[in-house]
Image (tube, helix red, strand yellow):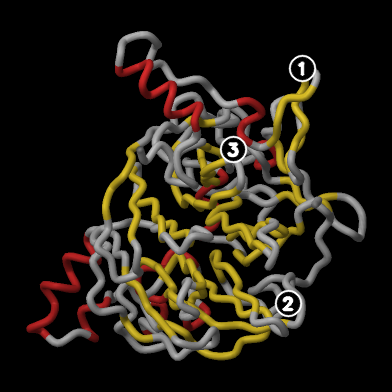
Amino acid sequence: PDCSLNGGCTIGKMLVAVMIGLGLASAAPTVPDCSLNGAMSGGVCVCDKPWSGPDCSTMNFKPVTFPQGYGMSPNLTSWGGNALFDGKQYHLYVSAMANHCPLSHWGSNSRIDHGVSDTITGPYTFKDVAIPTWAHNSAPIALKDGTFAIVHIGTGVGPPNGGANCNTTGWEQFVPENSRKEFAAATEDGGSTIHVSKSIGGPWTPLEPNTLGSCNNPAPWVHPNGTIFCVCGGSLKRADSISGPWTTVASFSHSGGPAGNYEDPFLYTDKRGFHLIYHVYNTNENPPHGHECVNSTVSAHAYSEDGFTWFTSPKSPYGTQVELTAGGTATVATRERPKLFFDASGQKTHLFNGVCGAPNCPNGPSTGCVDCKYANWDYLLIQPLDV
């Protein structure tokens, strides 16, 4: 039986399945110990690094040295991405706003930049435009056959510089009239375009056929056995090839997790099971105006032993406080688009986020800190994990 998507069926799981089938056991799921980030020993959780706390629900970090990431030096509005390593250099694929536009114009001016650095934290140097406007939420992955893919939203059919003068003109001006219906369907559904390359540095070409379908802010992950998983909204999909076909294998909610709106999932697997890191925001925090960003909700962790039954920790794994090597901490207004980097051994080492550099924004929108990003400085932050 396919008891687990992460590595087959254990004797224990087979026995439970049989007992449930015979009516000898309850089908009510049991919450895994230690948030699936550790194991019980002597009645207490022994946490896997970088996790800590009584239930292994909090991430530990190392301090950050500025400048780093992408968008700090030189100053450029960027909004999340991840890196691939070729053994010598790190190749960053990051959402960046063309024409020095603010993030509010992401639907016309976001593109995916390719940057390189000898160190994972950067700062990264611009190399080329990997995917032109508009393209957003870059999720690069290395495939089992030695090729590479970037899964993202947007169609990437425009010019590198997007809308002139930060206008809001969309992709229609760049697509022949007889092809607009097809592109409109993808765009209105939130995209889910895939670009592929034989080289870690590109060039990148659209995947044809792309059978992933509508998938807003897709979260792809390549399992060590070569299976490709992807979270689309509240569903987990799987495929044997990046071209598909894709099968929905599980659906889940975020019941029991931090209160707020969930978006920007990042999926990964480890020896204990499946994990999701989310951006979570709550527009009702810190009344009356919600712009003291020091304790804003920005994250959540969901987990599953088998990929079918999911749980969400009630505690956020991290917040808006970023420790600095120079001393003290920096507060970011929001911390979104989470992506984890894993080294060659499979150890997670760094967290990538799109962040808003404003520590607070008292004159910002009524929705609070999460929307300060539209009128303040945004950049890609890369923080080392304490592993």
Decide: is 213 above or below 309.
below
Front position in the image: 190 or 268 = 268
Residue 326: quadrant of the picture: bottom right
How busy is the neighbourhood of tag 3: few (under 14 within 10 Å), some, or many (20 plus)? many
Q: CA distance from mark 1 to mark 2?
A: 44 Å
The disc at residue 322 is none
Q: Secondary structure at mark 3?
A: loop
Name the mark nearer the viewer: 1 or 2: 1
Query: Residue at point 23% right, 58% down?
Result: 189
**Residue indicated by mark 1:** 43
Query: Residue at point 63% right, 66% down?
Result: 380
**Residue indicated by mark 2:** 123
How busy is the neighbourhood of tag 1: few (under 14 within 10 Å), some, or many (20 plus)? few
Q: What amino acid is found at the position of numbered circle 1 in the picture?
A: Gly
Query: Residue at point 65% right, 39% down?
Result: 317
**Residue indicated by mark 3:** 297
Q: Position of residue 280 (x, y in %)?
A: 51, 41
Q: CA distance from mark 3 to mark 1?
A: 30 Å
Residue 344: quadrant of the picture: bottom right
Quadrant holding the N terminus: top left
The single residue placed furthest to the left in the displayed view is 178
Q: What amino acid is found at the position of numbered circle 2 in the picture?
A: Pro
Going from the N terminus, do you reach mark 1 or mark 2 first?
1
Q: Could you tell whether 276 is left or right of 25 in the image?
A: right
Q: Could you tell whether 156 is left or right of 357 in the image?
A: left
Q: What amino acid is found at the position of numbered circle 3 in the picture?
A: Thr
Q: Secondary structure at mark 2?
A: loop
